[in-house]
Image (spheres, rainbow, N blue to C red):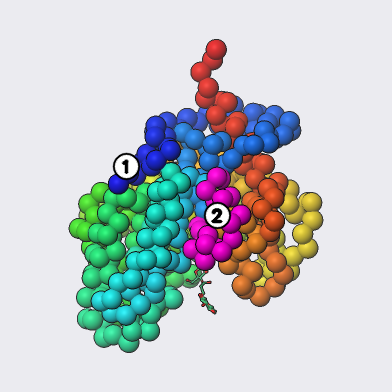
Amino acid sequence: MCDQRSPPGLAGTSHTMRRRTRNLLGALVLAVVATGVSAATTLRDAAEGLVPMGAALNLGYLTSDATYNSTAAAQYSLLTAENECKWSATEPSQGVFTFDDCDALWHFAQANGMWFRGHNLCWGSYNPAWLEALTPDEKRDALVDHVATVAARYDANVLAWDVVNEAISDSATGADPALKNSTWYPDVPDFVDVAFQTAREACPTCKLFYNDYSIASSQGWSSDKSDAVYALVSDMLARGIPIDGVGFQLHIAVDYGLVDGVAANMARLAALGLEVHVTELDVACGSAPDHDCTWTDAIAEAQADLYGQLLEACLDQPACTNFETWGFTDKYSWLDAQDGSPQHPLPFDEDYVTKDAFDTMVGVLEAAQEAHRPAA
Ligand code: G3I
């Protein structure tokens, strides 16, 4: 089993190797982007020594689409199973654990020298029907059993686990970090504590994360929910509940204007001693409420700018230790299962051709490498 910081092929890569000098970086990014990027550059090569570059992968596409498989392996140094490690996949009947699909993703990561990020141990949605039917006491027991079994199986061979996913109410605030009604709440009111404590007991060396959407920026429209998560994790730390980090999903659209707030939020979580992972980034073409999209060069550039700015924010923050998109090709995005036009949210188009977003991210990474290269 590999060391979680140095999977096969990535030996020597460590977050502590990351070097950041933002003032130099901005100028260098412009220079690199203006002159283009080297043709054969991959995201994982460009990011080596800086940060894992991740993507959520789907076993169905890995086995049915050879280009999806080879592109994922070539471009990314980290993967998350899009659905294969969720409760419905790993415990479809109570006490009957089915790890084949989650294992398959884990083995793909090992075979290709990638980190593996676990998603997720406890979520209030998309759970099997048997779980919903339990009494509150039975749910608590089922939670402990599930978290203990799954966390122990993969042990320390994951970069991190999303222990609890999306627990905070969309109307929560810092003063009132209310939990949303779900499988778990209000039936098991302390389920967040139970999940994290159980995960720590089952895997003392696992990095344990709270993961959510609309919590990335401490400024603007998401500030209330971001403050609520800040209050939640501050309280957990104060009470000795084990937690190592917060995952920013970052399902956003091209009109997202809160990158400074993301950097500020990363900084305040880092000041608590927590890590931050960008876990599910995608940048939709159309915005709420109708998500209509006409894909143009201008939209592609705006999308690329956002990818680049968020990657810079991560590279500038030592506590930001993963940069990951939810999928990687516009051929397959969860967003296109929603209503509305195709959203073109990812760095590769539907034919696996790199987009402006890819070029800009490589430019940011190459500039970061250049900024920290020892003078000749
Ligand atoms: O596999 C079945 C297929 O057999 C069936 O015909 C079809 C009919 O609807 O459903 C298929 O399962 C779907 C599965 O995705 C695989 O495509 C489920 O219905 C569908 O609910 C499931 O959606 C996933 C969703 O989480 C719920 O688990 C999305 O793929 C996945 O991208 C999404 O990921 C979430 C993160 O876990 C948490 N953050 C938000 C993110 C996006 O919603």
What amino acid is found at the position of numbered circle 2 in the picture? Asn
Element at label 2: helix
Number of numbered labels in the structure image: 2
- Whether residue 249 appears in this view of the structure is yes
Residue pictured at 52% horizontal, 66% vertical: 60
Q: Nearer the viewer, mark 2 or mark 1?
A: 2
Residue pictured at 73% horizontal, 52% vertical: 300
> Where is residue 31 shown, x and y percent of the image?
70, 29
> Where is residue 80 shown, x and y percent of the image?
45, 56
> Where is residue 167 shown, x and y percent of the image?
40, 68
Mark found first going from the N terminus, 2 or 1: 1
Horizontal side of residue 117 vs 359, given as left or right: left
Pick whichever, 19 or 7, lies toward us: 7
Quarter of the image where one finds residue 117: bottom left
- Callout 1: 10 Å neighbours few (<14), some, many (20+)? few
Residue pictured at 73% horizontal, 31% vertical: 35
What amino acid is found at the position of numbered circle 1 in the picture? Asp
Element at label 1: loop
Pick whichever, 50 or 251, lies toward us: 50
| Quarter of the image that includes the C terminus | top right
**Mark 1 beta carbon near ligand 1 (under 8 Å):** no
Residue pictured at 20% horizontal, 58% vertical: 201
Pick whichever, 248 or 258, lies toward us: 248
What residue does disc 2 label? 69
60 over 269 or under it: above or below? below
Q: Which residues are magenta?
A: 56-75
Q: Which mark is residue 3?
A: 1
Residue 150 within the magenta-colored segment of the rendering = no
- Callout 2: 10 Å neighbours few (<14), some, many (20+)? some
Residue 62 within the magenta-colored segment of the rendering = yes
Q: Are marks 2 and 1 in contact (CB under 8 Å)?
A: no
Would you say the magenta stretch is mainly helix, strand or loop?
Answer: helix
